[in-house]
Amino acid sequence: MTTRERCAVAGLLLAAGGGRRLGGRPKALLEHRGRLLVEHAVRVLREGGCTRVHVVLGARAAEVRARADLAGCVVVDNPDWADGMGSSLRAGLASLARTDARAALVSLVDQPGIGPEAVSRVLAACPSGEPLQESLASAAYGGVRGHPVLFGAAHWAGVAATATGDQGARAYLKEHLDKVRLVECGDVARPYDIDTEADLTHLE
């Protein structure tokens, strides 16, 4: 992927969850390595090669805006965040549809074990000469599909139409499995989620 093509890819960070299994603590407001988890996730996208980043907020969005340094990001409020990750994905893609972005690299705020190396590797998996808007690529861990996931703009409407509940783009990716370029990242990242109190041991 050329530098110009990378500039046409926007990072899309889903950070709206309310942390129900964490006692109602929004994951965006958890701390990791001296900064809020949402700030850490934005930095990962930028260091991985995304020059512009859209961040979808939901639970306690006003507090996240007040406390987090999201300078340079496009912040998208999702009033339907309680409906699940699918609603945040739809909100984020709708915000990107109003820009000149030709692809979205989607990541989740609660996966701090996935760093810039995985982001860069997925971006690099899209060969020059292939229409960026047709691209469909996903990080894989031991051959199992995970995040981040790159969706060319030609896929956004289909993803939005099938993104319901907490499924996100899972149904769409399953339907288009033959088109998804899997990019092994198990050697550079760990795809654990911060979902429960026990998972907080992963935060430093």
Image: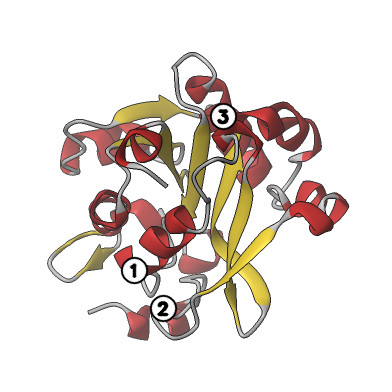
The kind of secondary structure element at disc 3 is helix
Q: Position of residue 48 (x, y in %)?
A: 30, 56
Tell me, yes or no, if residue 37 can be seen here: yes
Residue drawn where x is 59% and y is 41% of the image:
130
Tell me the kind of residue under disc 3: Leu
Residue drawn where x is 49% and y is 24% of the image:
96
Figure quadrant of the C terminus: bottom left
Residue that carries the numbered disc 1 in the rendered image: 117
Q: CA distance from mark 1 to mark 2?
A: 8 Å
Residue 93, disc: 3
Residue drawn where x is 36% and y is 43% of the image:
2
* Category of crowding for the residue at label 1, using alpha-carbon neighbours closer than 10 angstroms: few (below 14), some (14–19), many (at least 20): some
Q: Quadrant of residue 64?
A: top left
Q: Is residue 167 shown above or below 131?
A: below
Image colouring: secondary structure
Name the residue at the left extreme. 34
Residue that carries the numbered disc 2 in the rendered image: 189
Q: Is residue 48 shown above or below 76?
A: below
